Image (spheres, grey):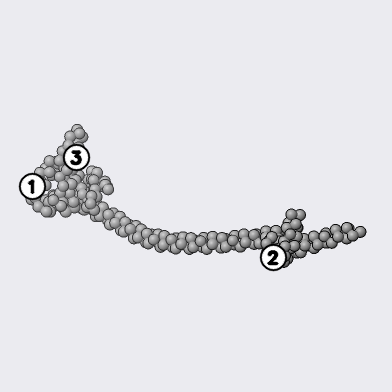
Amino acid sequence: MKNLVVINDQSVEFEVMDNGIFTTSLSVAAVFEKRHADIIAKISEFPTDDFNERNFSLVKYQDQKGEFRPMYKMTRDGFSLLVMGFTGERAYKWKIEFIAAFNKMEAMIKRGNSHLDVIINNMGVLNEKIDKLQAKNSALAGELIEASRKYTAALERENALLRRDAEGAGQLLKKSTKLSEAERDEVARLYESGLSQAQICRRLGRSDTAVRNAIRSRSLGSASGLFRGAL
């Protein structure tokens, strides 16, 4: 993230990198009205130590001619060390404005990090709710599967009962249907062979009434034939 601040009618660039805030030696030279080469030389005179490595970073920039030249990026501590020897009322004012710009950028980072912390916390709460919903959905899915299984079993039992009732009705219909001529002949033959009425019913799968009527009709027919012959 970069931000431009106007100091001494110069656009000063502040950049956030790795949660650190950096300005450039070009900006410092422009604001304090010094040659950039002199600023580079001043920084080069600093000892090469941990402080230098943390607060100054030598990079390249492209000038108006398209040529690449050296430039330093520096932190607030690096800036403070560099401008420590700059004196005068105007230099004092510009130092204050630089420091204010650094503070503003730091506040922006803190607000951003705070906002990020809130987002992370909210994401954690949201993920927890999602996990609970998923567990609840899994439980509901299990209940639905069990309910479906029970419903299917109930339908199968009901269908079995309906089939049994239908078969029973068919058997009852068969037993109560009027006997054909061939069936009546068979009833007569079995009766004459010595089978009882109940035995004939079981063998032919016909109702007691149908078999009894067949026996009676054949018996009456036989008797009628005898009477006709006698006359």
Against 231, is 63 above or below? above
Q: Type of residue at label 2?
A: Gln
Residue nearest the viewer, comparing 166 with 184: 184
SS class of the residue under badge 2?
helix
Query: What residue is rendered at 19% in x and 39% in y?
Result: 61
Taking the image as drawn, is residue 119 in sight? Answer: yes
Where residue 127 sits, quadrant-wise, is bottom left
SS class of the residue under badge 1?
loop
Taking the image as drawn, is residue 169 in sight? Answer: no
Asked whether the beta carbons under mark 1 and mark 3 sit within 8 Å of each other, the answer is no
N-terminal label among 1 and 2: 1
Q: Type of residue at label 1?
A: Glu
> Badge 1 local density, few (<14 within 10 Å), some, or many (20+)?
few
Query: Which residue is labeled 1 in the image?
Result: 45
Residue nearest the viewer, comparing 162 with 90: 162
Q: Which quarter of the rendering shows the C terminus?
A: bottom right
Horizontal side of 217 relative to 70 (left or right) equals: right
Against 40, is 208 above or below? below
Query: What residue is rendered at 75% in x and 58% in y?
Result: 184
Please provide percent x and percent y for residue 152: 54, 60
Against 166, is 7 above or below? above
SS class of the residue under badge 3?
strand
Foreground tag (3 vs 2): 2
Q: Type of residue at label 3?
A: Tyr
Query: What residue is rendered at 24% in x and 44% in y?
Result: 11
Q: CA distance from mark 3 to mark 2?
A: 118 Å
Please provide percent x and percent y for residue 35: 14, 41
User: Any mark on residue 199, and which?
Assistant: 2
Residue nearest the viewer, comparing 158 with 142: 158
Query: Which residue is labeled 3 in the image?
Result: 61
Foreground tag (1 vs 3): 3
